[in-house]
Image (cartoon, rainbow, N blue to C red):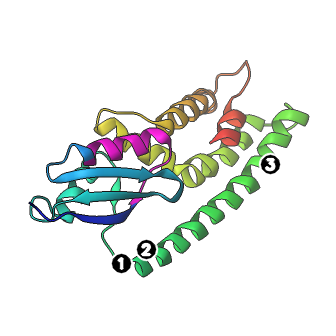
Amino acid sequence: MEEQKTRIFPVKGMTCASCAASVESMLKNTGGVAEASVNFADSSVRVQFSPDAVSEETMAGNIDQIGYELVITDNEDHEAEQQKAYARRKRKLWTAIAFSVPVFVLSMFMKDSLPKQEWILLVLTIPVMFYAGREFFLNAWKQLKHGTSNMDTLVALGTGIAITRPSGRCLLRVGGGDHYADFAGTFS
């Protein structure tokens, strides 16, 4: 009888229940893995496997194929990395707030009160979407490459479409209608 090993691995890139299900399914379908159970709340997976039949690197490679990262390091390195990621998310949150509040105020209470207001909204929206919301677009791209979708895909698609029309209007200098940069900047 093969000796089984149980280990808990951190998983990077999971942002929704669909992500967790994909990771769990991929590991369960990996030869040598007896059981896999994802804990979405702490972004980890508990895997029972036979070290003779499958290596940790093979499992990590399989998870990488579907756009996530199985972290094979000691716990202290992972905790330090989690602290850095938390600080990065916090910085992005405050950046998004700093740019979204003026977009919200301009579009809700001062509609068309400034010359070139759609340009102002567009300029204020770009950092929100492509700095603070960058991970949505990167994760959606990873999912697209693997023929799947998740909540990141939905957010990236919705905000991407919402910013396309006002961008085109500003760049092509055609007017009329409502602008949706405020939507894209507020919801990304």
Residue farthest along the top direction in this orientation: 177
Q: Which residue is mark 2?
A: 78
Q: Residues within 10 Å of mark 3 (few under 14, many from 20)?
A: some
Label 2 sits on what residue type? His
In the image shown, does 170 or 183 lie closer to the viewer? Answer: 183
Q: Secondary structure at mark 2?
A: helix
| Residue 167 in picture, x, y percent from top left | 59, 33
Label 1 sits on what residue type? Asp
Q: Looking at the image, tell me whether mark 3 or mark 1 is earlier in sequence order.
A: 1
Q: Is residue 166 magenta?
A: no
Above-or-below relation of 121 to 111: below
Q: Which residue is mark 1?
A: 74
Label 3 sits on what residue type? Val
Left or right of 33, for residue 135: right
Where, quadrant-wise, is the C terminus in this rendering?
A: top right
In the image shown, does 141 or 57 lie closer to the viewer? Answer: 57
Write the start and end of the magenta stretch as one range: 11-27
Residue at (36% x, 64% y) in the render: 9
Quick check: can you spot residue 120?
Answer: yes
The circle drawn on residue 101 is 3
Q: Quadrant of residue 183?
A: top right
Question: Label 2 vs label 3: CA separation?
Answer: 34 Å
Above-or-below relation of 136 to 44: above
